[in-house]
């Protein structure tokens, strides 16, 4: 899976601390914490017909990450929403848009790791792109990575940080194998997530997904669990072994950028019938119904 360049994005205006600049002229300081140390948190939002789905949940997670990392002078949710709105309006965007929010610790007055040399407050970057869901609708192929997910006693993965080298190394393995993404296990050998998405399996009509001890608490993942509860689909959160994925009736992954995507192959093994299964299909329809009518009306406020 290689994302495409969309001509509509050629002249994007990017928002950096409230200043809108052409994508080719946008930049952050070499003294910014994101450049120096990968010290930043981020969120991915999706715009559906002028509404951002689960905006409050995304902003809460951004604020939680900034608090966990002891950021100073963090913009309020209202300030962030206004900058997202300005960016969407400036780019004449209404639908089928992905918004990447990045909040860094800010600019340092000299190179170094010590947060005390950050005295200018945070840097907020709003990058909005015309971008439909990125995965192949017919299904994707995965391998299992040899790179393990980081445990919480080393770095809490529920801090949604921009330090993603762990996942990038797994993605390199997937690229080398000629597949879309890679399944990552935790240090106990249980399934955690892929390098980019959460995973769900279906077996005998029961939906199951791993704990989030060593991966972020996904907002699309939480939405799917809510849909299961609301519509009477049995679901559970538990430890899942790799062989359970091999023998699943259905397997799908979730994320804001790709929504719900079936997995048709893992480590060369065909999953289920090698096509989107009935429960995956039902959940995709329920998710589409929710995103079509729910969300924060950011372009009408």
Image: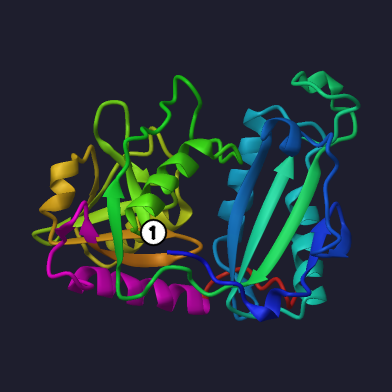
Residue 145 position within the rendered picture, expressed as x and y whole percent measured from the top left:
32, 41
Residue 291 makes an appearance in the image:
yes
**Closer to the camera in the image, 86 or 261:** 261
Q: Quadrant of residue 203?
A: bottom left
Q: Which residue: 74% across, 58% down?
A: 126
Asked if residue 267 lies in the magenta stretch, the reply is yes
Residue 216 makes an appearance in the image:
no
Residue 288 position within the rendered picture, expressed as x and y whole percent measured from the top left:
42, 76
Q: Which residue: 20% across, 73% down?
A: 275
Residue 226 position within the rendered picture, expressed as x and y whole percent measured from the top left:
36, 58
**Closer to the camera in the image, 260 or 236:** 260
Q: Secondary structure at mark 1?
A: strand
Q: Which residue: 56% across, 41% down?
A: 160
Residue 99 position within the rendered picture, expressed as x and y whole percent measured from the top left:
65, 63
* Label 1: few (<14), some (14–19) or many (≥20) C-alpha neighbours in 10 Å: many
Q: Is 197 above or below relative to 257? A: above
Q: Which residues are magenta?
A: 265-293
Q: Is 19 above or below relative to 300? A: above
Q: Which residue is mark 1?
A: 254
**Residue 207 placement, left or right of 175:** left
**Residue 177 placement, left or right of 274:** right
Q: Is 106 above or below relative to 43? A: above
Q: Is 110 above or below relative to 18? A: above
Q: Quadrant of residue 14?
A: bottom right
Q: Which residue: 69% across, 66% down?
A: 128
Quarter placement of the C terminus:
bottom right
Asked if residue 181 lies in the magenta stretch, the reply is no
């Amino acid at each position: 899976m290689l994302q495409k360049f969309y001509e509509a994005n050629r002249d994007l205006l990017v928002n950096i601390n409230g200043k809108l600049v052409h994508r080719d002229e946008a930049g952050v300081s070499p003294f910014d914490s994101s450049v120096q140390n990968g010290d930043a948190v981020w969120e991915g939002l999706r715009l559906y017909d002028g509404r951002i789905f689960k905006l409050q949940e995304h902003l809460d997670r951004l604020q939680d990450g900034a608090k966990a990392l002891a950021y100073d002078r963090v913009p309020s949710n209202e300030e962030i929403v206004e900058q997202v709105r300005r960016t969407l309006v400036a780019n004449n965007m209404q639908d089928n848009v992905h918004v990447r929010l990045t909040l860094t610790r800010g600019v340092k007055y000299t190179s170094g790791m010590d947060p005390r040399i950050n005295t200018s407050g945070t840097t907020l970057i709003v990058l909005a792109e015309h971008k439909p869901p990125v995965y192949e609708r017919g299904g994707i192929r995965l391998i299992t990575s040899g790179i393990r997910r980081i445990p919480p006693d080393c770095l809490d993965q529920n801090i949604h940080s921009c330090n993603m080298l762990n996942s990038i190394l797994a993605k390199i393995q997937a690229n080398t194998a000629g597949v879309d993404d890679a399944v990552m296990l935790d240090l106990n050998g249980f399934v955690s997530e892929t390098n980019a998405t959460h995973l769900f399996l279906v077996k005998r009509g029961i939906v199951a997904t791993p704990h989030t001890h060593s991966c972020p608490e996904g907002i699309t993942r939480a939405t799917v669990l809510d849909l299961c509860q609301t519509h009477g689909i049995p679901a559970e959160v538990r430890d899942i072994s790799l062989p359970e994925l091999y023998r699943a009736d259905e397997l799908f992954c979730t994320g804001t950028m790709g929504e719900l995507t079936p997995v048709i192959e893992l480590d060369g093994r065909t999953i289920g019938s090698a096509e989107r299964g009935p429960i995956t299909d039902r959940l995709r329809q329920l998710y589409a119904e929710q995103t079509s009518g729910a969300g924060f009306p950011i372009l009408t406020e």
